[in-house]
Amino acid sequence: MAGRKVAWGKVALQQFNTAIEYISEDSVQNAEKVRVEILEKIEPLMDHPEIYPPDKYKLNNDGNYRAFECQRLRVAYYVSDAAIRILRVRHTGREPLTY
């Protein structure tokens, strides 16, 4: 199904904004670069949600939970027939949580 909506979960959006704010404390330019790169990686999900591999940290993953890494941030998302839901954004150095 092409043209699915991409929706950010409340927690994921908060995590994303917190990560960008943290990076901007050191470099506003790097923060903007990371923000743009992540958003550019999310954009193709509308038409190609399976572009990134299944999330290896999701237990009992039926393939609908997927993830990608960009600039040491890991973005996890869920693919349904109707939409793509961004679930979480975390630094790759952190231990993964179950979800």
Image (cartoon, rainbow, N blue to C red):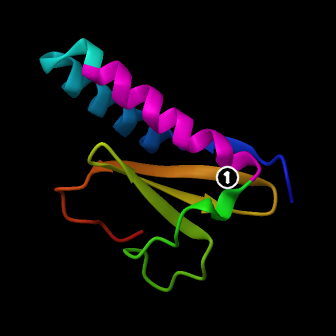
Q: In the image, is residue 40 part of the stretch drawn in magenta? A: yes
The residue located at (35%, 39%) in the rendering is 15
Residue 12 shows in the view: yes
The residue located at (67%, 52%) in the rendering is 84
The residue positioned farthest toward the right in the image shown: 1
Coordinates of residue 51 in the picture (x, y in percent)? 62, 61
Local secondary structure at mark 1: strand
Q: Amino acid at mark 1?
A: Ile
Coordinates of residue 57 in the picture (x, y in percent)? 37, 74
The residue located at (72%, 56%) in the rendering is 48
Figure quadrant of residue 81: bottom right
Crowding near pointer 1: few (<14 within 10 Å), some, many (20+)? many
For the stretch drawn in magenta, what is the main secondary structure?
helix
Coordinates of residue 83 in the picture (x, y in percent)? 74, 52
Figure quadrant of residue 99: bottom left
Stretch of the chain drawn in magenta: 30-47
**Quarter placement of the N terminus:** bottom right
Relative vertical location of residue 90 with respect to residue 26 in this rendering, above or below: below
Q: Is residue 1 left or right of residue 39?
A: right
Relative vertical location of residue 9 with respect to residue 36 in this rendering, above or below: below
What residue is pinned by disc 1? 84
